[in-house]
Each structure stands twice: as C-alpha cells, then as structure tokens.
Image (tube, rainbow, N blue to C red):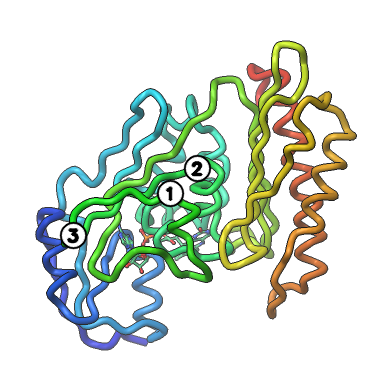
Amino acid sequence: MKPAPYTLHRPTSTAEAVHLLSTLDNARVLAGGQTLMPMLAMRYAFVDHLVDLNAIAGLDRFSFDGEQLIVGALVRQRELEVSPLIAEHAPIVAEALAQVGHIQTRHRGTFVGSVCNLDPASEQPALASLLDASIVAEGPRGRRTIPFEEFALGFMTTALAPDEMVTEIRLRTWKRGHGFAFEEFARRRGDFAIVGAGVMVSIDAGGLIDRVATVLCGVGGVPARLDLSSLIGQRPVENAVNTASEIARRVDAIEDTSASKAYRRHLAGTLVARALHRALARAADPGRPS
Ligand SMILES: Cc1cc2nc3c(=O)[nH]c(=O)nc-3n(C[C@H](O)[C@H](O)[C@H](O)COP(=O)(O)OP(=O)(O)OC[C@H]3O[C@@H](n4cnc5c(N)ncnc54)[C@H](O)[C@@H]3O)c2cc1C
C-alpha cells in the first residue's frame, strides 16, 4: 500500500521545526522513519504534514557529561550499539540494542524516536526507564525536562504535546564495574520481544549486593520497574536470583493475541533470573568476557 498524501517539511533548526509543529494541523515529527513510514504506508496512521528532523544540525550529538549520556534526537541506534562511550558507561544499552530489529533498521532508527513511539514491547523505553532518563522537549512555550516516569503515560502515549518535539534524552549512568544483562524472548530474531528484562546490579567491597535495578518490557503499556530492594545486603548467590524471579513472576501482565497473562509472567520470572544471574557474574568479575 502507499501512504495517503501529505506535505513533507525539512526544517534546518529546532525553532523552525517547533514553529511548523505549532502552526500546522495534523503534523508529525519524522526521525528514522522505521516505525512511522510503515504505519503511514499501511494506513494505520494519517498525517497532513511530516516534519522531517534529519536536516537539523546538532541533533545527532552524542556525549557524556560525567554523569549522564546525552543522546540527541538523530543519534541512530547502531551508533549507540558500537559506541565506546556506551561500552564504558552503559554497556546494557549495547546489549539491548543488538536485539532491536535488524542491523539495517538500527542504522536508520533513532533511540529517541523509539522512546517517543513508546511501543510496549520495545527495549528502548525500557532502557530509558532503567537508566532514570530525563526527556528534554522543546515547544512554543520553551524547553522542559520530563522524568521518564512522567513522560510515559500509558500504551503508546507520552506527555509530549502535539506542538513539542524531543531534542535529547539524558541517561543516568552507574559507577564502573556494575553488572548488567538484557534478556528477551521473541518468536524470531529481529521481532519485537514478547517479554524482555534488563537488570543492573552492583556489589560492595564486602561482596554484598548494594544496588539493583530491574525493568521489564512487553508486560504492560509502559516499562515495568520491579522493586528488588529486598536483595540489598544479600550475598550474590542463587537465593537472590530465586527471590528476584519470584517477584518478577508476580508482575501485573497483559494478555493479548501473542501471549497469555500466565505465559508473560512465566517469561518475566525466567528472563529476570537469567539476566540477574549474568549481571551478578559480571559484577563479581567486571573484567571477564561476556
Ligand atoms: C523490521 C523492523 C523491526 C523492528 N524491531 C524492533 C524491535 O525489535 N525493537 C524495537 O524497539 N523497535 C523495533 N523496530 C522499530 C525501530 O526501533 C524504530 O526505529 C523505532 O521504533 C522508531 O525510531 P525512528 O527513529 O525510526 O522513529 P520514526 O519512525 O521516525 O518515528 C516514530 C514515532 O516517534 C515520533 N518521534 C520520533 N522522533 C521524535 C522526536 N524527536 N520528538 C517527538 N516525536 C518523535 C514520530 O512522530 C513517530 O510518531 C523495528 C522496526 C522495523 C522496521
């Protein structure tokens, strides 16, 4: 199928893009186009105006400010996947992105576009949740910074107004040497996950767990963070993995044509156990090959 007719705009500044979004009816931002273009072609989405961000200089900026990784709106998924900055400060991002679509889609698709799209099965909103992301949005009323938990309102629904665009996402990094793992189950390689689990963990000088964070994608409208605070102070042994798995199995999961609620809960328990197991091994020996 072909998309219904629309007018394409190619602004060269964020101010111009915001002006277009705030003055045109039924306008939508275009970034990597890996979701929006198929949606238009299949006529699941209709727009009168596409505001293509790709000619705006500076939106492809990717940097580290000492605490946060700053990901511009045009930074491609593949660039993050192979970035030395990611390898050093947030290696879970590379591990999760390697499971997103295909190398071709990752060369074009943007991390920011995926977070804005907020597909419930997507790895990228889950990473934004896990890394306590701040979303920087620009609109006719100026710039605002939105914590991810306030940005992700529900099934494919964000706090972004129709006349706003996201210019960058800031990901809060953990101290070096932390353990991490992203595990998911999809029917075929490259498909969206039915359920995915991201885990980050650190171990103190006495060999006890001192910090842990876990997120699930594919269980509800927005990424689900699990409360694993009961693991703090525990030895990083099988018991801790079993406790985490039990907590994950109790998550409030959705049911749809892809999987039942019970199956999603089963996957959540299994994937969290696998991810925590690998994350603990990495935290105990940060130098070991993955
Ligand atoms: C074959 C295939 C397999 C895929 N598999 C996966 C997968 O396994 N996991 C996964 O997570 N994704 C998957 N994707 C989707 C892919 O990751 C997309 O790249 C991503 O979801 C959207 O990013 P984009 O830059 O392409 O955004 P676009 O398609 O350009 O836009 C997506 C939506 O976000 C909005 N948007 C984009 N950027 C901004 C911005 N800066 N400000 C405000 N709104 C914005 C757009 O208006 C649109 O509504 C797959 C895609 C394909 C084609």
- Which one is earlier in the sequence, the residue at label 3 or at label 2? 2
Label 1 crowd bin: few (<14), some (14–19), many (20+), radius 10 Å: some
Q: Determine which of the numbered discs, if any, sits on residue 206 in the image.
A: none
Q: What residue would you read off at disc 1?
A: 147
Q: What residue would you read off at disc 3?
A: 141
Label 2 crowd bin: few (<14), some (14–19), many (20+), radius 10 Å: some
x then y, percent, for residue 41: 36, 81
x then y, percent, for residue 21: 18, 69
Describe residue 45's horizontal placement relative to residue 22 as left or right. Answer: right
Q: Is there CB contact under 8 Å for labels 2 and 1?
A: yes
Q: Determine which of the numbered discs, if any, sits on residue 132 in the image.
A: 2
99 or 46: nearer the viewer: 46
Residue 48 in the image: above or below residue 14: below
What amino acid is labelled 2 in the image?
Asp
- Which one is earlier in the sequence, the residue at label 3 or at label 1? 3
x then y, percent, for residue 208: 77, 20
- Which one is earlier in the sequence, the residue at label 2 or at label 1? 2
Q: Nearer the viewer, mark 3 or mark 2?
A: 3
Q: Label 2 to label 1, Cα distance in Å?
A: 7 Å
Residue 43 in the image: above or below residue 203: below
